[in-house]
Amino acid sequence: MIFDFGYLVLVLALLLSAYGAVVGFCGGMFGQGASPGRGGAGAAQTHAIDGYASGLSPRLTNSSFHAVYAVTALVGVAAVILWYGLLDDQFQISYVWNSSERSLPTFYKFAAIWGGQAGSLLFWTLLLGLFSTATALTYRRSQRALMPYVNATLLGALLFFLVLLVFSANPFEQIGVVPPDGRGLNPLLQNYWMVIHPVMLYLGWVGLTVPFAFAVAALLSKQLDRRWVRTVRRWTLIPWMFLSAGIIMGSQWAYMELGWGGYWAWDPVENASFLPWLTATAFLHSVIIQEQRGILKVWNVALIWLTFTLVVLGTFTTRSGILSSVHSFAQSPVGPYFLVFLSITTIGFLLLLFRRLPFLQGENEIDSISSREGAFLANNWLFAGITFVILWGTFFPMFSEILTGERISVAAPWFNRVAGPLFLLLFVLMGVGPLLGWRRTGAGALRRQFTWPLLAGLVSVPFFLTTSRNPFPVVGLSVCVFVSATIVQEFVRGASARRRSRGEPLHTALWGLLRRNGRRYGGYVVHFGIVLIGVAVIGNEFYQSTTHVTLAAGQSVDLAGYTLTYTELDSRRSSNHTEIRASLLVSDSTSGRSLGTIAPRRNIYDKAPDQPTSEVGLRMTPAEDVYVILNGWQGDGSSATFTVYINPLTMWMWIGGLLVVIGTVVSVWPHPQPARSARSVSSVFSDRATPRQVLA
C-alpha cells in the first residue's frame, strides 16, 4: 500500500509542476509592465486591463513559488518511501529486487537508489527540487522580474523528469510474487567511491539547471544587463565544483576498481560528464568579461544553453543504450523522451535567443589582442574546439553505424592526438590571461609580467630533456612550470604589497589576499590544481612502465627500480562476496631495502560470480605509484599472474583535484570588500586594472 501511495505522490507532483510552470510563465508575462496609455475610452479600458494584469501577476508568481516547494516536498516523500523499500528488503518492488539483496551492507543499500535507472531518476528529481527550492528561497524577495520565469523553467525541468518517473521508469513498480531475495547490486558499484562519486556528479549536472533557468528568464524578461550574470556566477561555480569533484572521484574509482592501470579511457560516459564541465568552465571565464566590459553577451547566453544541453545529452547517452560503456544503465524506453525534451529545449531556446539578439549587443569592443578580453575570447574558442572534438569522437561510432552499417570505434589514442595540443594551448592561455591588463597591455607591462615566468619555463626545459627525448612531455611539463610561475608571481606580488602597506607578516598577508579578494586568488588556487592534474596526466601518459608476469610463490620481478616478490594467496569471506588476496613484498632493486607489502585482490560476489572485480594493490608516493593487478592464479595459489604498472606522478592528480575544490570554496565564500585605499590599490595592481575593476 505504501508503494502505491509513493506512485500517487509522484503523479500529484507531476500535476503541480505543470501548474507551477504555467502560472510562473504567466506571472512573468503579466508583470512586464503596462502598455502605453491612449486617450479616450480605449485608454480607460487599456488601463483597466493593465491594472488587472498587474494585480494578477504577484498572485501567479507567489503560486509558482508555492508549487516549487510543494513539488520538492512530494518528491522527497517519494524518495523516502523508496529508501524504506531498499533498507527494509521489500523485494516485491521490482527496483529493490534488481538493485539490492539481504546480505548487501546497509551502506550500499542506501546508495542503491542511484544504482539503477528508476531510482537514479528519482534521486535526480529530488536534487533538482532541492536546487529549485534553494533558488526560490534565496530570491523570493529580489529579482522580481526574473523569478517567475526562473520558477517556470525549473518546474518545466521537474515536469520532464516526473513524466519519466510516472510513465516510463516507475520506481514503485511491483512484481506479482514476492521473491525471497534480490538480485544484488552491480558488483562494480560496490565500492566506496561509487557511493559518493555519483552524488557529486548529480549535484553538478542538476545544479547547472539553475543558471540555464536564469538565462531563459533574462531572455524572456529582456533583463540582459550585467546584473543577471552576477547573480548566476555563484550558481554556476557551486555545481561546477561538485562536477569537478565527481569527475576526479570517478577517475579514482576507475583507477582503483577497473584494474587497467589508468584513470581515464575517453569512455562515452566519461566524456558525457566532461563535456558540460568544459562549457561551464568557459562560461565562468567569459562571464568576467561581461561583468567588467559588457561584452561577450551572446557567448555567455550560448555557453549556458550549451552546458545544459550537454547535461541532457549526456544523461540521454547514459540511459538510452545508443553507446556502449561500462558506466551505462541498461537499455530502457526513456531514450525517446530525452530526445523530445532535447529537441523542445534546443529549438525553443535558439528561437528565443534569435529574437533577443538586439538586446545582446556589446557595450564595448575588444581593443587589442594583447588584453585580458582578447585572451578570454581565445579561451572561449579553445574550449569550444575541445568540446566539439570530444563530442565528435564520442558519437562517431553511432554516426558511422547509421551511415555505413559498420560501428567504427574511436579509442583513446585519437582523443589524445587531437585534443592534446588544444589542451596544451589552453594551459598556455591559463598562464597568459591573468597577466594581461584590461583593454591593452603595453610593451613595458608585458616585459614586467612575463620575464620571470618565461625564464622559469625555459630553464626547466634542459632538466626535462634528461627524463625524455620525446618533445611532447618536455613541452607539456615546461608549460606547467610557466603557468605555476605566473601563479606564484601573483601571490608574491600581492603579499609583498600588503606587507609593505600594512606591515603584515607573510602568512598574514597571504591569508589577507584570500580573505579580501577570494574570487581572484581562489581562482589562482584552482588554476594551480589544474596544473597539478596536467602534471599527473603527462607523467602517467609518457613515463609509465608496465609488465605482465606469472610468479610462483617466492619468485620476483624487477621493474623501473622496484623488486616485487610474490609470497602467498589467501581468501577472506565478507557479507556478500569472497576476497581472493595475493601478497607481494616491494623492495628497492638497487639497495634491497624493503618498501612494504601490497595486496591486490579479486572479489567474487555471490549473486554475480561471473563478474569478479579487481581491487588493485597500490603503493602511492609523490614520485610514483606501484600498481599491481591480480589477474588469476593456479589451484591453491602456488602461482599467480599479475600485471604491474609504475605510474609516475599520479598522486598529484588527486592533490590537484582537492585544490580545485578548495579554490572554488575560497572563490564563492563571502568575503569583506577590499579597503578602498588609493595607495594600496595603485601599489598592488599598478597599470593592469583600474581601482573600480579591482574592487568590483
Image (cartoon, helix red, strand yellow):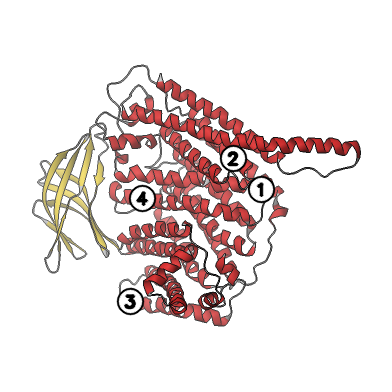
Residue at the disc numbered 4: 249
* Kind of residue sitting beneath label 2: Asn
Rendered view: 125 above or below 375: above
Q: Quadrant of residue 203?
A: top left
CA–CA distance in space, label 1 to label 2: 14 Å
* Kind of residue sitting beneath label 1: Leu
Q: Secondary structure at mark 1?
A: helix
Residue at the disc numbered 2: 151
Q: Secondary structure at mark 3?
A: helix
Q: Earlier in the sequence, mark 2 or mark 3?
A: 2
Label pair 4/1, CB-CB below 8 angstroms = no
Q: Residue at x 56, y 40 (%)?
A: 154
Q: Earlier in the sequence, mark 4 or mark 3?
A: 4
The answer to whether residue 333 shows anywhere in this view is no
Label pair 4/3, CB-CB below 8 angstroms = no
Rendered view: 618 above or below 425: above
